[in-house]
Amino acid sequence: MSDLKQAACKAIDEYADELHTLSKEVWSHPELNFEEFYSHDYLTKFLEDRGFPVDRKYKCDTAFRAVLGESSHGPHVAVICEYDALPGIGHACGHNLIAETGVAAGLGIKAAFEAAGKPLGKLSVIGTPAEEGGGGKIVLLEQGVFDGIDIAMMSHPAPMDGPAISFNAIQSLMVTYKGKASHAAAFPWEGVNALDAAVNAYQAVSNLRQQMKPTWRVHGIITKGGTKPNIIPEETELEFNIRAPKKQEVDILTEKVKRCFQSAATATGCTMELKFSERPYLDVIHNKSLLGAFEENMKIVNLGNRIPEKEFPAGGSTDMGNVSYAVPSIHPMFYIGSDALNHTREFTAAAGDPIAQPYTLAQGKALAMTAIDVFTNPQLLTQIKEDFTKDIRAS
């Protein structure tokens, strides 16, 4: 390793206990979309106490930005933290570890700047709330937070290592059916049953699945089904997610799903309202040259449990996809010492287990070393930008 990379890795090792405490604090205080006040305050104070100027509540009450250096000195690199949890099951996607990797990388890059005797460019450690459905990164994109950034990086825990696992584009929507209430025993013929519409819609989508491509996903729940069994339900609601590898396919699939919803309204005599998410997520474009540098640096730390990516098919979605359409980006997945699957209680436990720490610190080191490559190798940055231009044209 170069002296700068050695300095970065040494600093991360020296902060290992404090980084573990950071991760555990976020894990112990799970907070939902745009409500990550404890995590925001803890992370920003942690960074401030270690020499980072921090913009708290940056463009959003639970977002932040810590900045070192100037873009006039070299490239502008962003390392991203996430820290929101899931309802009911806490940090079942391990965002506490994502926060840790981002902060660890920031500390490593800071140490490299100090070893060089000057900033090598500009570093932004960006805290992004509400990945689990709120589209926090999209909010920050709209506010110009990612303007002028040359590359953006983050790393996400999983049951295995996967540097370039595919992520689907996603559209979320709410369906409301309105009918007419009536006594379900005495005068049922006077009612118009909105629950029948909801059930028919759910079943129609299930029937559609036989005609869906293997990479398409539609899943939903009935969020409101009525008030009492002896009242014909006059209003029901469903929430659905529609996913596919590209936005264009999501649009096609959405039209098919809408017909299922409309048929249920027609069959039952209900009226229907559709409300689409204001912030649909795009698929992730993994920048090939940036990813190549990251993989070379992962060989140095030599931790993980990589499996063939074909064994981990596309399925999940992230607002990092929207960032990857604006800035050359990577979003690798990393093993944390457990076979537990994301969005399960078992993964929540794994994300808080000390066993995850060596793997998490290794990701922080690899991100920091990749940033150092970008700072010190102008040819690499040129290739990253060329790849980005090609990818956007092909998308």
Image (spheres, rainbow, N blue to C red):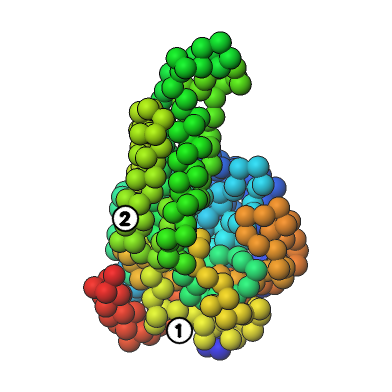
Q: Position of residue 72 (x, y in %)?
A: 29, 70
Pointer 2 local density, CA inside 10 Å: few below 14, some 14–19, many at least 20: some
Q: Position of residue 195 (x, y in %)?
A: 50, 30
Q: Kindly check if marks 1 and 2 are in contact, taking CB atoms under 8 A apart as contact.
A: no
**Outermost residue toward the left in this view:** 393
Q: Position of residue 134 (x, y in %)?
A: 45, 46
Counting residues from the N terminus, which is met first, the one under dot 1 or under dot 2?
Answer: 2
The quarter of the rendered structure image containing the N terminus is bottom right
The residue at the point 51 percent across, 12 percent down is: 187
- State the residue position of label 2: 251
Q: Position of residue 235 (x, y in %)?
A: 46, 25
Q: Could you say which quadrant of the image residue 216 lies in?
A: bottom left
- Amino acid residing under circle 2: Asp
The residue at the point 44 percent across, 22 percent down is: 192
| 230 relative position to 149: left or right | right
- Name the foreground residue: 265 vs 339: 265
- State the residue position of label 1: 292
- Name the foreground residue: 77 vs 320: 320
- Amino acid residing under circle 1: Gly
Q: Could you say which quadrant of the image residue 334 lies in?
A: bottom right
Q: Note whether 4 is above or below 274 in the view shown.
A: below
Residue 118 appears in the picture as rendered: no
* Residue mark closest to the camera, 1 vs 2: 2
Q: Note whether 256 is above or below 78 in the view shown.
A: above
Pointer 1 local density, CA inside 10 Å: few below 14, some 14–19, many at least 20: few
**Outermost residue toward the top in this view:** 186
**Outermost residue toward the right in this view:** 354
The residue at the point 65 percent across, 42 percent down is: 88
Residue 175 appears in the picture as rendered: yes
- Mark 1 lies on a secondary structure that is helix
